[in-house]
Image (tube, rainbow, N blue to C red):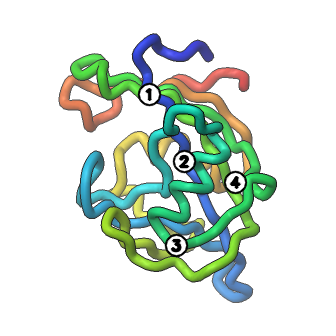
Amino acid sequence: MPRPPRASPVVLCFLFRETGQGGPEVLLGLKKTGFGIGRIVTLGGHVEPGESPEQAAVREVFEESGVSVAEGDLEPAGSIEFMFPSRPEWDMSTVVYRSWTWSGAPAPSAEIEPAWYPVDAVPYAAMWEDSAYWMPKVLSGEYFAAAVTLAEDNECVGSVVFSSP
């Protein structure tokens, strides 16, 4: 999927753990500052100049949760082009990763209050609306490519289009 001309490069990284009793869990977090404040979000953020998406994912996971994940343990999960017609400067070209291998205990940061959620009970109502469209693919282990166009309010979903990755 071609990247919009002004889209910022972004990464999202889903960390998973097996609980043994209640099934797998995914690490998400309450956003305390910045874009998405007050929502449950995925760990991740902007790719810095000179940084690969994998390096950005490793850095963002550590900065936001204190958890360490190695680049080699990142599994590509897909890509999402986020388009904000009312605010094109917010457009994002996103690489999505998942990992079952990481070390450390999630701890709060200035930006995120991390928490584990059962994969079958993700709090979509507390997240960006678009998450309910594409996140089930991440959680089920699928690889996907999506284009998400937000509505005029920059919050509701205008459209979601999946294409062949």
The location of residue 96, given as percent across then percent down, is 61, 43
Q: Amino acid at mark 1?
A: Ser
Depth check: 34 or 162 in front? Answer: 34
The location of residue 47, given as percent across then percent down, is 51, 38
Alpha-carbon span between mark 4 and mark 1:
27 Å
Q: Residues within 10 Å of mark 1 (few under 14, many from 20)?
A: many
Residue picked out by circle 4: 140
The quadrant where residue 142 appears: top right
For mark 1, give the secondary structure.
strand
Residue plotted at (71% across, 78% down): 18
Alpha-carbon span between mark 3 and mark 2:
16 Å
Mark 4 touches mark 1? (CB < 8 Å): no
Residue picked out by circle 2: 12
Q: Residue furthest left?
A: 153
Q: Amino acid at mark 4?
A: Ser
Alpha-carbon span between mark 2 and mark 4:
16 Å
In the rendered view, tell whether residue 33 sits above or below residue 11: below
Depth check: 32 or 49 in front? Answer: 49
Residue plotted at (41% across, 56% down): 41
Alpha-carbon span between mark 1 and mark 2:
13 Å
Depth check: 136 or 48 in front? Answer: 48
Residue picked out by circle 1: 8
Q: Amino acid at mark 2?
A: Leu
Q: Earlier in the sequence, mark 3 or mark 2?
A: 2
Q: Which mark is residue 66?
A: 3
Q: Earlier in the sequence, mark 2 or mark 4?
A: 2
Mark 4 touches mark 3? (CB < 8 Å): no
For mark 3, give the secondary structure.
loop
